[in-house]
Image (tube, rainbow, N blue to C red):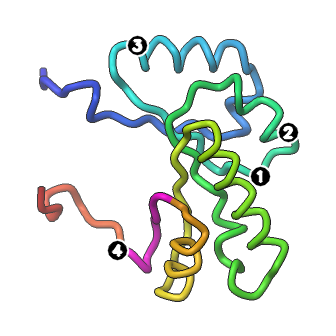
């Protein structure tokens, strides 16, 4: 058995799964957060009622759906959606993560919008754990 501190664990739950049974998801997340685990709400923005239930779902991070990030440079609607998600997240104390950051131009755009973290091939390609330097 491994002794992994719960504070080092961050679970991802998709927006769709979370809203399927909001009360059970909220209870589950709360219980694991009580022992120190953290949660990221994945694919945020892909659902219909994202902002409505967000204040009742105790997550630590919002992973902004990659479909908005991919075209953020040439689609003003995608840019506005990312900006809105980030602003709401910051206002309620939830950090944001941009998925599908594929190049430096996208990285600079999300930095300018105030997004907290980036994920994608523009940052680093996925690699096996034995190659990760800690």
- Compare marks 4 and 3 and give the one earlier in the sequence: 3
Q: Position of residue 52 (x, y in %)?
A: 83, 33
Query: How many labels sit on residues?
Result: 4
Q: Which residue is mark 3?
A: 34
Q: Is residue 40 above or below residue 25?
A: below
Left or right of 31 on screen, residue 75: right
- Compare marks 2 and 3 and give the one earlier in the sequence: 3
> Disc 1, disc 2: CB below 8 Å?
no
Q: Which residue is mark 1?
A: 46
State how far apart marks 2 and 3 are (Cα). 26 Å
> Disc 1, disc 3: CB below 8 Å?
no
State how far apart marks 4 and 1 are (Cα). 24 Å
> Disc 2, disc 3: CB below 8 Å?
no
Q: Is residue 117 above or below residue 2?
A: below
- Compare marks 4 and 2 and give the one earlier in the sequence: 2
Image point 43% across, 17% down: which residue? Answer: 32
10 Å crowding of disc 3: few (<14), some (14-19), many (20+): few
- Compare marks 1 and 3 and give the one earlier in the sequence: 3
Location of the N terminus by quadrant is: top left
Please give the label number shown on residue 49: 2
Magenta stretch? 116-124
State how far apart marks 1 and 3 are (Cα). 28 Å
Left or right of 42 on screen, residue 48: right
Image point 51% across, 72% down: which residue? Answer: 111
Q: Position of residue 116 (x, y in %)?
A: 48, 58
Q: Which structural element holds mark 3?
A: helix
The residue nearer to you, when weighing 52 against 129, is 52
Q: Position of residue 57 (x, y in %)?
A: 65, 25
Closest to the camera, between mark 1 and mark 3, is: 3
- Compare marks 4 and 1 and give the one earlier in the sequence: 1
Location of the C terminus by quadrant is: bottom left
Q: Which residue is mark 4?
A: 124
């Amino acid at each position: 058995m491994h002794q992994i501190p719960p504070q080092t664990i961050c679970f991802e739950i998709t927006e769709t799964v979370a809203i399927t049974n909001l009360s059970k998801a909220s209870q589950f997340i709360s219980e694991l957060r009580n022992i120190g685990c953290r949660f990221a709400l994945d694919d945020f923005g892909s659902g219909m009622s994202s902002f409505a239930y967000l204040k009742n779902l105790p997550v630590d991070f919002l992973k902004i759906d990659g479909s908005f990030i991919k075209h953020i440079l040439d689609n003003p609607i995608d840019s506005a959606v990312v900006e809105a998600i980030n602003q709401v997240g910051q206002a309620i104390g939830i950090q944001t993560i941009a998925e599908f950051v594929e190049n430096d131009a996208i990285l600079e755009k999300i930095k300018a919008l105030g997004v907290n973290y980036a994920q994608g091939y523009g940052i680093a390609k996925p690699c096996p754990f034995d190659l990760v330097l800690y």
